[in-house]
Amino acid sequence: MATYTTVAELKEHLNIELDFTEDDNYLQSLLNVSELAVANFCNGGINEVIEIPATIKQAYLFLAAHYYLNRTPIAFTSTSELPYTFQFLLNPYKDFVVC
């Protein structure tokens, strides 16, 4: 039950047409997982706030998009983490009130 991001925002991030609704339930489940993963990364739940920082919202979208585009945990190429992405966006909030 994602509360900070919407399927429409994720579709825009992924360049998916809004009228393509076949994957909407799956996209919603990925948003749910990404918000929980961000909360876990930040060592706690997200407090009830009116507006979250844009960096945290971007981390939700990055993670959900990654799960959508990479549906299996197996990589057939060498992997490397991109700098300035998920951890870079969230590290400042690990001990912050929002996370």
Image (cartoon, grey):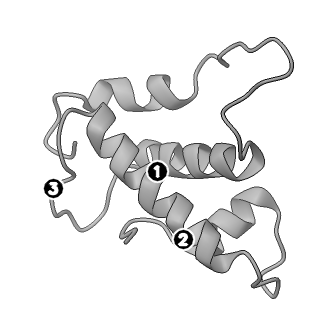
Disc 1/disc 3 C-alpha distance (Å): 16 Å
Q: Whole-percent x and y of residue 25?
A: 60, 77
Q: Whole-percent x and y of residue 62?
A: 60, 44
Name the residue: 13% across, 42% down. Answer: 97
> Which dot marks residue 18?
none
Dot 1 surroundings within 10 Å: few (below 14), some, or many (20 or more)?
many
User: Residue 18's image quarter?
Assistant: bottom right
Q: Earlier in the sequence, mark 1 or mark 3?
A: 1
Circle 1 is placed at which residue position?
Answer: 34
Tag 3: amino acid: Asn
> Which dot marks residue 28?
2
Marks 2 and 3 close (CB-CB < 8 Å):
no
Disc 2/disc 3 C-alpha distance (Å): 21 Å
From the viewer's perspective, tell me whether residue 69 is left or right of residue 28.
right
Dot 2 surroundings within 10 Å: few (below 14), some, or many (20 or more)?
some
Work out whether 85 lies above or below 51: above
User: Residue 42's image quarter?
Assistant: top left
Q: Earlier in the sequence, mark 2 or mark 3?
A: 2
Mark nearer the viewer, 1 or 3: 1
Work out whether 63 lies above or below 18: above
Circle 3 is placed at which residue position?
Answer: 47
Tag 1: amino acid: Ser
Q: Earlier in the sequence, mark 1 or mark 2?
A: 2
From the viewer's perspective, tell me whether residue 23 is left or right of residue 91.
right
Name the residue: 84% across, 77% down. Answer: 17
